[in-house]
Structure formats: C-alpha cells, structure tokens
Image (cartoon, helix red, strand yellow):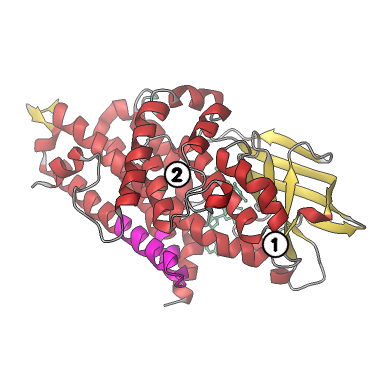
Amino acid sequence: MNIAPEFAAAGGAPNYPSPYFSAEHEMLRAQVRRFVETEIKPHAGAWEEQGYVPREVLRRMGSLGFFGIRYPARYGGSEMDTLASVVFAEEMGRSTFGGVAITALVHADMASVHVFNAGSAAQKEKWMPRIISGEVITAVAVTEPDAGSDVKAIRTTARRDGDAYVIDGAKMFITNGVYGNLYCVAAKSDRGAPSSRSITMFLVEKGTPGLTVSRALDKHGWRSSDTAELHFDSCRIPAANRLGEEGRGFYAIMKNFQNERIVIGAMAMGEAQAAIALTLDYVRTRSAFGAPLWQKQAIRLRLAALAAKVEAGRQLVYHAAWLDSQGIDATKEVSMVKAYCGELVNAVMDDCLQFHGGIGLMRESAIERMTRDARVQAIGGGATEVMLEEVAKRL
Ligand SMILES: Cc1cc2nc3c(=O)[nH]c(=O)nc-3n(C[C@H](O)[C@H](O)[C@H](O)COP(=O)(O)OP(=O)(O)OC[C@H]3O[C@@H](n4cnc5c(N)ncnc54)[C@H](O)[C@@H]3O)c2cc1C
C-alpha cells in the first residue's frame, strides 16, 4: 500500500507530470503554495475570529498577480487559462482556511468576471486595473431572500429614470458584501419580459446612497469570509453603470457560473487533499490498542478509497477546465464537477474528522474548521440537486 507516502510527500499531490499543466502553471502553483504557507496559514486563525481577511493581505495577493491570472496584460493581468484558475483555487483550498480561499476566489473568478466579460471598454479601463491590484474588491449579488437556486425568480428591480437606473430590493448571502467596494448586481429591468430576458447586471459602488449593508451574516463555516445581506432603497446609479445589454443578465450569470463552478470544484479538491494529508499524519502517530491507527485496516482502506475518489474528482475538474479553455461547451462536465466535488469534500471531512476522534471536534484542530467550511460546498454556487438536474438534462 503506497498511496499514503505519495500523498504525504507532496501535501496530497502525486509527483508526476500532468498533461494539463505547463511549466508556467507549475510556477504559479509553487508561488501560491509558498504564499499560503508563509502569509496565510500563520495568520488566518485571527482572521477567522475577526470575520474577514485584512485588506492589506488582498492587496498583497493583487501585487503577486493572483487576481489577474486570466486578464489581459494591458490591465495588469497575466493572460493565462482556465487551468491556471484551477491551480490557484486548488492551492487556496489546500490552505485549510476555506473562508480565506473563497474571499479571494469570489473576487478573482466569480464577481470580477462580470466586469470583464460584459463591461464596456470604459468600464474595464476604469475598474480592471484596480480589481487586479486588489485595490478594489468585488462581490456578485444575485441571490435574494426569496430566490437562490431559481435565479429567474429574483425580485429586485431596476427602473430606468432619465440618465439613471433606480434599484429597489434585497440581496442575501453576498460574499465580500460587507467589506467589498464594487457590487455586480442582478435586477429585473423589464418585468413584462419573459424571465430569462428580464434580468440585467449593474455595477453599484459601495457608498452609493440607497445601498446599505443591512446585516453581516454569522455563519457555520467560512468564518473569515464576510457575507452580507444588502438592501437597495431607491438606489440611483448612472445608466453608464449597466453591465452589458439590457435583458442579458440571466445569460451572463449562467455563463459566469461555469467558471465559478470549476473554481469551487478545484477549491473543494484542494481542501480534500489537505484533509487526507493531515489525517494521514495523525493516524500514523496516534496509537490505540497497542499500535498506530494506520495499522487498522478499516482506517487504512477508508483513507485509500477517499484518496482514489479525490484523485478522480481532481481529474474531472482538470478535464472540465481543459474543455473550457478549448472553448468547448462543458456545461455537463462542469455540473458534474460541482455536484461530485461538493458532495465528496463533505464525505472526506466527515471520515477525516472521525479518524481524529475527540480532538477532531475541538476548535483547536484544523479538521474541525475544515469540516464546517466544507458544508456550504454542496449548496453555494449551485446546490447538488440543481447541478444533477443539469447533468440529467444532458444525458
Ligand atoms: C456562505 C454563502 C455564500 C454565498 N455567496 C453568494 C454570493 O457571493 N453571491 C450570490 O449571489 N449568492 C451567494 N450565495 C447563495 C448561494 O448560491 C445559494 O445559497 C444557493 O444557490 C442556494 O440557494 P438558496 O439558499 O436560496 O436555496 P434554495 O434555492 O431555497 O434551495 C434549498 C435547497 O433545496 C434543494 N433544491 C433547490 N432546487 C432544487 C431542485 N430544482 N431540485 C431538487 N432540489 C432542489 C437544494 O437542496 C437546496 O439546497 C452564498 C451562499 C452561502 C451559504
């Protein structure tokens, strides 16, 4: 049985070349891993307590190029591909601090993509350099108190009034919503249109009169990620803040979900690898009934089976990302990624916590936090059932 030493040696990553990754990807992986070890892990416990990642840390990530991985050089980006986003997400997931990972990933891969993909030349000139440097942190506000999975059912409205839009409504569970600066907001601009053509995206800056953070939400996991409930009360924004054409918001959200789900899958598999690696360390040193726990076949084989499933999940993430990078429609594979990895990371945490015994339930152990952090992965960004419906439609 030699699965374990390989996993332990590279923190979960087998040491063999992959057809998916170039030398540039591997350099990025090494750089992110170094950053995680030296600048996240020693401090993130305190960020969990305070409920957000300090802005200077996000600026530092920007200065290292982590927020411009996919964007053009003219804005300060490095023009890499979907697989590079996967590398970043997997290594952030491996940090063991899901809240820190999601803070960075929502900004880099889930919210700012709305500005880049639908923004006008002027909007991109204005915002992209500041987004990439980490000076401006973005949020995407789609979910509402009464509409999550069913995006078409949102009720927030945007009414055209001369050279402005007036937004009214509420948004729920918005990551980076408390401390972020720029919100990409979905609202119904034409309530008479069929629901798929009634939604438009808008840019709303923090501080715009009529926009308030009504609550900073207190969560089960991801505690270093700030999550907000937002309220829009006659919030007037310039018409020039519309992102893309009127009525195209639903399609933009669905398109950007593909990247979001690949990235969440990669993050989940990074978390799962880290959990297996730290559980291997634990069961090799912890003894019961006269021998290390690793000597119990029941434990060894469960960890081996999880390692096999995580390896399968990683390869599915890489494959979906590769399809995406080739411009091939990968909605089925991406939905599989979100469903499979979201469930698997929870199964991994559950067993890994079990093998830690009582200490696994103590706040001082990483696996306790990681188990809480993993729970949302089967819900946020597309609940498992919703993702499986997408797969089923395409079978
Ligand atoms: C910590 C956190 C951060 C988030 N960050 C953001 C963010 O930054 N921006 C944003 O816009 N949203 C964000 N969300 C919202 C997230 O994407 C939604 O919670 C998710 O899409 C599910 O929506 P809901 O919570 O309204 O659940 P509902 O849509 O009410 O669904 C409840 C449950 O019903 C089941 N279900 C739903 N539909 C179906 C179906 N068709 N068939 C079978 N079962 C179904 C699923 O099990 C689902 O979990 C975040 C959520 C959390 C918890």
Residue 90 position within the rendered picture, expressed as x and y whole percent measured from the top left: 37, 46
At which x and y percent is residue 315?
Answer: 30, 59
Residue at mark 1: 153
Which amino acid lies under the numbered mark 1 shown in the image of this protein? Ala
On the image, the x and y values in percent for residue 8 come to 19, 38
Residue at x-position 50% and y-position 58%: 259
The magenta-colored residue range is: 313-337
Indicate the quadrant where residue 247 lies: bottom right
Q: How many marks?
A: 2
Q: CA distance from mark 2 to mark 1?
A: 25 Å
What residue do we see at 43% from left, 51% from top? Answer: 85
Q: Residue at x 43, y 58 (%)?
A: 82
Give the mark nearest the N terminus, 2 or 1.
Answer: 1
Which element type, helix, strand or loop, lies under badge 2?
helix
Q: Is residue 361 left or right of residue 381?
A: left
Label 2 neighbour load within 10 Å: few <14, some 14-19, many 20+: some
Q: Residues within 10 Å of mark 1 (few under 14, many from 20)?
A: some
The answer to whether residue 272 is seen in the rendering is yes
Q: Which residue is mark 2?
A: 375
Magenta stretch holds residue 326: yes
Q: Amino acid at mark 2?
A: Arg
Q: Is residue 357 left or right of residue 299?
A: right
Q: Is residue 353 above or below residue 202?
A: above
